[in-house]
Amino acid sequence: MRRPPLGHVLATAHDMDREYRMLDALQHTDVPVPRPRLRAGAEIIGAPFYVMDFSDGVVLRERRQLEALAGRVPAALAEALVDVLTRLHRTDFVAVGLADLGRPDGYLERQLRRWAAQFAASRSRDLPELVRLGTRLGRRLPTPQTAAIVHGDYRLDNVTVDPADGRVLAVLDWEMATMGDPLTDLASAVLRWDGIRGLDSPVAAVPGDVPGFPDSQVIVDSYARRTDRDLSDLPWYLGFAFYKIATIFEGIHFRLQQGLTVGDGFERLGVVVPALVERGHAALDAWT
């Protein structure tokens, strides 16, 4: 069962109807997703929710799980993650009935406005460099890619996998899915693979911190081979990915300060957020 978290929830976040619709639409495509069974409003348990089939795989969220993977499995995981992502981006969103789920035109501008608003809604301290990063991103936008279904939070710990061979069995957590620029998904996967390495993030283990895992260039090269998309502007998308994750982590930090959430190591987010912002600026500095 999926339901929104307790406590302070940002506007437009944790959209159960959107998640259910995405799973239902992708059932008959080559994108692996659990089958949704029912959805309901808040009248039953006090919050909207839906029920889906169980995916009999593993969510790799802890470092010990990553360290237990043997042989070629880490490299196979990287390839499988890209394989499923390119399948998603090739899916005809009109044919599966999702054309009205989002507006591809102006997607990047709206995303920047959205995450600036999310930061404003969960602001507990001054972070001028985070504000400046958003301003820099908005000053010059890349040429938009051909629109595709965008997962919105694509990363290793949002899929279930077979730990024996690295196959992706199901993609989860579709709350931010829409129609938009697919390179935002690629940048998200890259950032969560090794872009936050060395920061001791408490949210999920970072493959780049674990010996035996390839670096994210493998993900970028694999995506380039499987698609005909121009990746020359990827540094901008990485800068945006850092902006987005910094805002998300700051939201968790806000809820922690308000006593609305708990989690092992969440107190470290106060230090992690400025480091993420610094890496976002570095990504933009590399964009030519």
Image: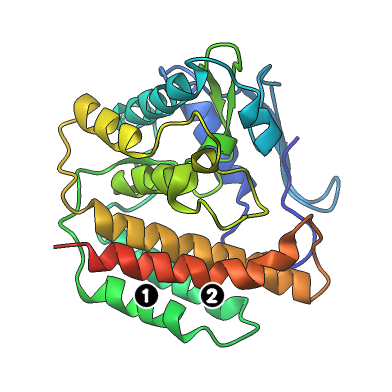
- Out of 130 and 76, give the one closest to the viewer: 76
- Relative to 71, is 26 above or below? below
Residue 177 appearing in the image: no
Q: How crowded is mark 1: few (under 14 residues within 10 Å), some or many (20 or more)?
A: many
Left or right relative to 151: residue 259:
right
Label 2 with label 1: CB-CB less than 8 Å: yes
Q: Name the residue under label 2.
A: 119
Q: Which of marks 2 and 1 is nearer the N terminus?
A: 2
**Amino acid type of the residue tagged 2 in the rendering:** Phe
Say which residue appears at 73% left-offset and 70% top-offset. Answer: 255
Left or right relative to 181: residue 112:
right
Left or right relative to 24: residue 48:
right
Image quadrant in which the C terminus is located: bottom left
Q: Give residue 279's position: percent from left, percent from top.
A: 40, 65
**Quarter of the figure with residue 257:** bottom right
Q: Give residue 128's position: percent from left, percent from top.
A: 46, 86
Gap in angstroms between the C-alphas marked 2 and 1:
11 Å
**Amino acid type of the residue tagged 1 in the rendering:** Gly
State the SS at label 1: helix
